[in-house]
Image: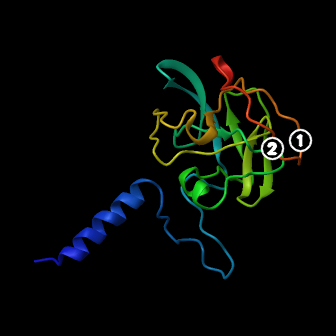
């Protein structure tokens, strides 16, 4: 018979893996190399997909795995304020060479505290650990909003964000 602690630890590990907290160490063979969570890859793809957002079907941006992409209202075009525990809940999308399908906005890469973080029209992009492909659960939560193809560009600024404006509506979350 298995020991109860081993069974509980195995269940806990399975839960952590299911929300993206465990990453295989294959490929991280040299000292100083790093392993990134599943939302990060060398060639992240940003594409569009339909999803229910606040009870209405919208076209949103998703990553290569179909997970909804969000932006954090307090970020600037030159600085991510999503670090530590917040970044574990809202993993940044990183890539050194992002690609896009079905979008007209501009993808860029900002080398910041989160590595080579992908931005769409200046908005740094994140996933949410509670989401699954085609499922939006983080809309408006902790000042994160779903990124859409019509997301208006933000100016490049290193100034801290001021008070948050009212929640956007329509196709430009």
Helix, strand or loop status at disc 1: loop
| Viewer-closest of 76 and 122 | 76
Q: How is the image coloured?
A: rainbow
The answer to which quarter of the image holds residue 104 is top right
- Residue 84, given in percent of the width and then of the height, sits at 62, 62
| Viewer-closest of 31 and 131 | 131
Q: Earlier in the sequence, mark 1 or mark 2?
A: 2
**Furthest-bottom residue in this view:** 31
- Residue 53, given in percent of the width and then of the height, sits at 51, 25
Q: Does the residue at mark 1 contact the one at mark 2 (Cβ under 8 Å)?
A: yes
Q: Rounded to the nearest whole Å, what is the CA distance between mark 1 and mark 2?
A: 7 Å
Residue 132's disc number: none
Label 2 sits on residue:
76
The answer to which quarter of the image holds residue 36 is bottom right
Residue at position x 73%, y 42% in the image: 74
Q: Quadrant of the C terminus?
A: top right
């Amino acid at each position: 018979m298995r020991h109860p602690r081993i069974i509980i630890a195995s269940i806990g590990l399975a839960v952590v893996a299911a929300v993206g907290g465990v990453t295989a160490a294959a490929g991280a063979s040299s000292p100083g190399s790093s392993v990134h969570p599943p939302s990060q890859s060398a060639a992240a793809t940003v594409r569009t997909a339909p999803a229910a957002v606040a009870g209405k079907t919208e076209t949103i941006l998703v990553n290569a795995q179909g997970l909804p992409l969000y932006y954090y209202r307090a970020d600037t075009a030159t600085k991510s304020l999503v670090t530590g525990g917040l970044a574990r809940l809202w993993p940044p999308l990183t890539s050194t060479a992002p690609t896009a399908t079905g979008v007209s906005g501009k993808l860029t890469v900002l080398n910041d505290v989160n590595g080579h973080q992908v931005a769409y029209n200046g908005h740094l992009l994140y996933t949410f650990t509670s989401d699954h492909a085609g499922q939006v659960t983080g809309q408006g939560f902790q000042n994160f909003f779903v990124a859409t193809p019509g997301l208006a560009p933000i100016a490049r600024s290193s100034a801290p964000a001021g008070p948050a404006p009212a929640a956007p509506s329509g196709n430009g979350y």
